[in-house]
Structures are given as C-alpha cells and as structure tokens.
C-alpha cells in the first residue's frame, strides 16, 4: 500500500505557509534594519557637520 504525497494530514500546506511567513518576516526585518542603519548614518553625518561648523 503506497500513500500519495498529499495524504500527509495537511502538514505540507502548513509547512509551506510557515515558510512563506518566515521569508516575509525576514525580509521585513532586513528592510527595517537597513532603513534604521541609513537613518543612523545620516544623523551621524549631520551631527559631524554641525560640530565642524561651530566656532572654537
């Protein structure tokens, strides 16, 4: 008696959905991380310019 691949009690669909959600979560966290890094670099550059423009 052989079973078909789709007769796995529905775990295949759940695993595919979980993998898709995991990929979306990782992509979103990478996007947020890169945006925050750009913001930190921009603020650092602006603060360095402001300090350099101040008279001693």
Image (cartoon, rainbow, N blue to C red):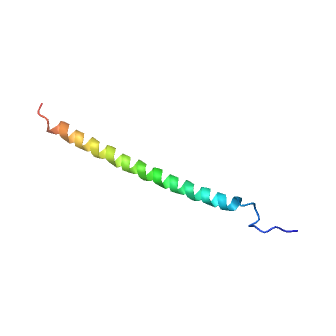
Q: Residue at x 78, y 69 (%)?
A: 4
Residue 30, how many percent across, how many down? 45, 51
Outermost residue on the top side: it is 56
Outermost residue on the right side: it is 1
Residue 20, how many percent across, how many down? 57, 59
* Number of numbered callouts drawn: 0
Outermost residue on the front side: it is 9
Q: Residue at x 66, y 62 (%)?
A: 13
Specify the quadrant of the image occupied by residue 3: bottom right
* Position of 5 relative to 23 (above/below): below
Q: Choose between 40 and 13: the one closer to the eye.
A: 13
Q: Choose between 33 and 3: the one closer to the eye.
A: 3
Q: Quadrant of the N terminus?
A: bottom right
Q: Residue at x 46, y 53 (%)?
A: 28
Q: Residue at x 23, y 39 (%)?
A: 47
The answer to whether 38 appears left or right of 47 in the picture is right
Residue 43, how many percent across, how many down? 28, 43
The answer to whether 5 appears left or right of 29 in the picture is right
* Position of 18 relative to 7 (above/below): above
Specify the quadrant of the image occupied by residue 5: bottom right
Q: Quadrant of the C terminus?
A: top left
């Amino acid at each position: 008696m052989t079973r078909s691949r789709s007769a796995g009690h529905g775990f295949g669909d759940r695993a595919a959905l979980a993998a898709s959600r995991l990929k979306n979560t990782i992509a979103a966290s990478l996007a947020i991380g890169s945006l925050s890094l750009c913001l930190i670099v921009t603020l650092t550059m602006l603060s360095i310019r402001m300090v350099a423009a101040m008279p001693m």
